[in-house]
Amino acid sequence: MATMPTPDRATSVDLGTGASPSSPTPAFSPLYQQIKALILQSLQAGEWKPSTAIPSEMELAARYKVSQGTVRKAIDELAAEHLLVRRQGKGTFVATHAEHHVQYRFLKLIPDNGDPNSEGPAQRRIIDCKRSRATADVARALALRTGDAVLQVRRVLSFSAVPTILEDLWLPATPFKGLTAERLTHYDGPMYALFETEFGVRMVRAEERIRAVLPDAEQAALLQIPLQTPLLSVERIASTYNDTPMELRRGLYLTSTHYYRNALN
């Protein structure tokens, strides 16, 4: 008689209807990690859209032929990684950058008074949005080939009418076909919410490098500051599911009235 896999057994899941036969599944990882990988595959495939509910733990347990405890542990990890959101009495939902608590998960520049809501949303000015060819460093960051098509965006973010952040972004051209300066200008929400809702690209994690720099003449002019003003340089590579890089962002932050906050848990 066949036995039901237990949460502690390192075994392989019968994919059934849970994933396509070609989807790789680790054969010797803990069972809940295999279920986590299958749920991630469904998220990446767009089976469950941002802000919508995923099936219940009972339904997922039946789908993957495992216990509810195994499913719960997989969902707990995905919730801790901000990919899913539990809502008491309502279920579990796919996280979205359109939600306020997610909007500032990457952007951590906080006014000196400590309240990120005190200034209201940033005023955005799109300087440029153009198609170009990836240089060697951009291609390396985005896992492309040198010369591949990319979209290059430059914008200035102001708080209380004071230019505070200058950002240069590079995006792979194919997933973001149709992105224009006009589209960026007229979208009211955060940029990652635009990527998510209109291009189906959800940024789920990022790696940042931070250093202190001085601006060049063009950067100083855009931020309306003297050339010798120290700035915080933040280079970020943001990735979607399966750690696929989708954005290289280089930001210069004026910190005379703001600070960069990083909460370590």
Image: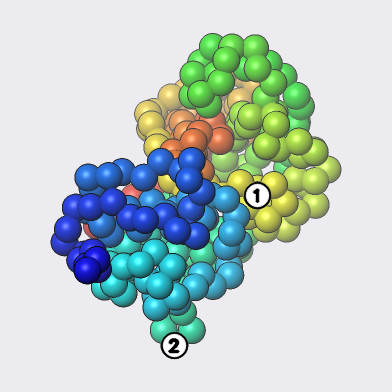
Hey, which quadrant is residue 221 in on the image?
top right
On residue 200, the disc is 1
Q: Residue at x 51, y 55 (%)?
A: 42
Callout 1, which amino acid?
A: Gly
Nearer-the-camera pick, 3 or 24 = 3
- Disc 2 secondary structure class: loop
In which quadrant will I find the N terminus? Answer: bottom left
Nearer-the-camera pick, 95 or 65 = 65
Residue at far bottom of view: 89
On residue 51, the disc is none
Horizontal side of 100 relative to 10 (left or right) equals right
Q: Residue at x 44, y 38 (%)?
A: 243
Q: Position of residue 102 (x, y in %)?
A: 49, 61
Alpha-carbon neighbours of circle 1 within 10 Å: few (<14), some, or many (≥20)?
some
Q: Position of residue 82 (x, y in %)?
A: 41, 59
Residue at far left of view: 8
Callout 2, which amino acid?
A: Gly
Where is 137 relative to 159, above or below? Answer: above
Q: Is residue 7 visible?
A: yes
Q: Residue at x 33, y 55 (%)?
A: 13
Q: Position of residue 191 (x, y in %)?
A: 64, 49
Q: Residue at x 45, y 58 (%)?
A: 16
- Disc 1 secondary structure class: loop
Where is 185 relative to 168, above or below? Answer: below
Q: Which residue is mark 2?
A: 89
Residue at far right of view: 182
Hey, which quadrant is residue 208 in on the image?
top left
Horizontal side of 233 relative to 170 (left or right) equals left
Where is 161 relative to 176, above or below? Answer: below
